[in-house]
């Protein structure tokens, strides 16, 4: 019974992560376009740094047409490749023209849905078309279906999404007016720790935030998840009050998190000490409260969530409030985290000693010839005559933490003198089963196995300095040499 319930919870988490990844997957590849639009807005609108009546005409077409179409095209491609992207763009024009507000939510619905419908329609006559007529049927079927879907989106979906957007905006406004927006951190911060940060930020907050920017020139919603303050405070707490490896690695993680904007770097620190989620929530609520008090916001999404990206999207009038929110949130999360770590310091020190003993035992076992699970799994490649040539680091978005881990392992492989092994990073959703070895965070491994079941999978709890990297390098030396011989 217990095993079943645990499996169900694990499966539910995987499904939630997968859905969240799908939503954020439509936004993340197009973040550069959002940043470009934010810079144009910051410079050329009447309240911008350098107002310009001519260049400001770029703002509305980009937010009303370019950005939603990019999102729809990306969503369509995720479902059905190039044809899916084309019909997604056609259908989304219907929902864009059918409403007077930016149709980001509409694009995220209509784009993938229209691609899925085309995929089903194509299957109806797959293999039944006479040779020479394939292109004719493909183009006309997509064109006619696109025509129908655009009309359906114009008359049916646009009014529904407009109403939904108005309802969501009304809820946000009500929370702001009543000073309740900080409560959102109770849900956002734990969600981030479960690797739903991109889904929360780009799948939920960004569509509503962009609409607010069109109306008021900025949105506080862009600061709810992207604020680097809570993570900074947690890492500072570990730097001062942590023990062992956590304390030693935290200062380096601060640079990656605060300046690089890779928030995932502090998630393992919270996961190893779950009570630290209270520090994240406290810091998040404080940061939101300060931004509400100063009525601050950003002109566009800050991605990645580094202090540099945040300040780059901050209006000239909001610098003081935004900077204070980061400082205050870091201070509160540091204070709460410090109390938690100091209270459990004796127990943590004892556990650290146990870990050292376990490490000594493991070393003794290794000297006796016992191999790790990684050695065993990769050894299977040698026995089947296939060397490990393609290693993929996979994370939720395929950009931040996985890129960092890939860089670390790449350097270790280079120092070991191993040649012919490529180490890349990508989103879990883009795994195609061709990787020999897939490395993921332990909370994401189940999803990765589902996408690439024939690969060898390695789970780590920290992308920056996992001891399993050394095992992988050792395994590569033995496995690849064995195959070469």
Image: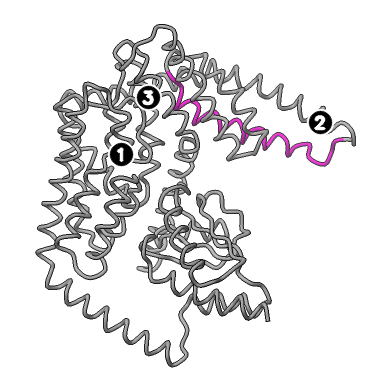
Which secondary structure type mostly characterizes the magenta part of the structure? helix
Residue at 59%, 61% in the rendered image:
435
The residue indicated by pointer 1 is 226
Residue drawn 36% across the image and 40% down it: 200
Task: Give x and y (percent) for residue 312.
Answer: 32, 31
Please state which of residues 135 and 160 is positioned toward the viewer in this rendering.
Answer: 135
**In terms of sequence position, does the residue under pointer 2 or pointer 3 come before the other?**
2
Q: Which residue is mark 2?
A: 135
Gap between marks 2 and 3 measured at Cα: 39 Å
Task: Provide the residue designation for mark 3.
Answer: 210
Q: Which element carries disc 3, helix, strand or loop?
A: helix
153 relative to 309, above or below: above
On screen, residue 441 versus residue 281, left or right, reads right
Q: CA distance from mark 1 to mark 2?
A: 46 Å
Residue 480 marker: none
Quarter occupied by residue 213: top left
Magenta-colored span: 102-129
Query: Is residue 22 one of those drawn in magenta?
Result: no
Query: Mark 1 falls on what kind of element?
Result: loop
Mark 1, Cα crowd under 10 Å, few <14 / some 14-19 / many 20+, is many
Mark 2, secondary structure of its residue = helix
Depth order, front residue of 463/485: 485
Q: Residue at x 17, y 56 (%)?
A: 237
Q: Quadrant of the N terminus?
A: bottom left
| Residue 82 image offset from top left, x and y in percent | 66, 35
């Amino acid at each position: 019974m217990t095993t079943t319930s645990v499996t169900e919870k694990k499966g539910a988490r995987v499904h939630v992560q997968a859905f969240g990844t799908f939503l954020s997957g439509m936004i993340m590849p197009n973040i550069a376009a959002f940043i470009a639009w934010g810079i144009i807005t910051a410079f050329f609108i009447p309240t911008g740094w350098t107002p310009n009546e001519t260049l400001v005409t770029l703002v509305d077409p980009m937010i009303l047409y370019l950005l939603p179409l990019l999102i729809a095209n990306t969503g369509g491609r995720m479902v059905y490749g190039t044809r899916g992207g084309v019909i997604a763009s056609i259908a989304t024009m219907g929902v864009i023209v059918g409403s007077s507000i930016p149709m980001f939510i509409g694009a995220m619905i209509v784009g993938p849905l229209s691609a899925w419908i085309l995929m089903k329609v194509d299957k109806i006559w797959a293999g039944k078309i006479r040779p020479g007529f394939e292109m004719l049927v493909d183009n006309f079927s997509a064109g006619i279906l696109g025509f129908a879907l655009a009309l359906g989106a114009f008359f049916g979906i646009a009014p529904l999404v407009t109403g939904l957007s108005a309802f969501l905006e009304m809820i946000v406004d009500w929370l702001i007016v009543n000073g309740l927006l900080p409560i959102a951190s109770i849900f956002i911060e734990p969600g981030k720790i479960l690797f739903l940060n991109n889904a929360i930020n780009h799948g939920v907050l960004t569509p509503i935030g962009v609409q607010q920017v069109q109306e008021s020139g900025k949105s506080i919603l862009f600061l709810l998840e992207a604020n680097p303050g809570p993570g900074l405070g947690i890492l500072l707490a570990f730097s001062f009050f942590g023990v062992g490896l956590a304390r030693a690695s935290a200062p380096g993680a601060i640079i990656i998190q605060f300046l690089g904007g890779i928030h995932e770097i502090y998630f393992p620190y919270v996961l190893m000490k779950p009570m630290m989620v209270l520090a994240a929530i406290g810091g998040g609520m404080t940061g939101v409260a300060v931004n509400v008090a100063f009525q601050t916001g950003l002109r566009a999404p800050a991605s990645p969530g580094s202090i540099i990206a945040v300040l780059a999207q901050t209006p000239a009038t909001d610098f003081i409030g935004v900077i204070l929110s980061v400082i205050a949130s870091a201070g509160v999360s540091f204070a709460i985290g410090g109390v938690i770590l100091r209270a459990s310091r004796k127990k943590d020190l004892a556990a650290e000693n146990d870990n050292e003993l376990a490490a000594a035992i493991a070393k003794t076992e290794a000297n006796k010839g016992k191999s790790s699970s990684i050695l065993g799994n990769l050894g299977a490649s040698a026995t089947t005559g296939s060397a490990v040539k393609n290693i993929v680091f996979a994370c939720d978005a395929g950009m931040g933490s996985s890129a960092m881990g890939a860089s670390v392992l790449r350097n270790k492989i280079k120092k070991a003198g191993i040649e012919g092994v490529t180490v890349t990073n990508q989103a879990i959703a883009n795994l195609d089963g061709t990787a020999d070895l897939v490395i993921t965070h332990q909370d994401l491994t189940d999803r990765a196995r589902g996408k690439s079941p024939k690969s060898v999978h390695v789970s780590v709890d920290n992308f920056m300095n996992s001891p399993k990297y050394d095992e992988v390098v050792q395994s590569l030396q033995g496995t690849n040499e064995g195959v070469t011989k």
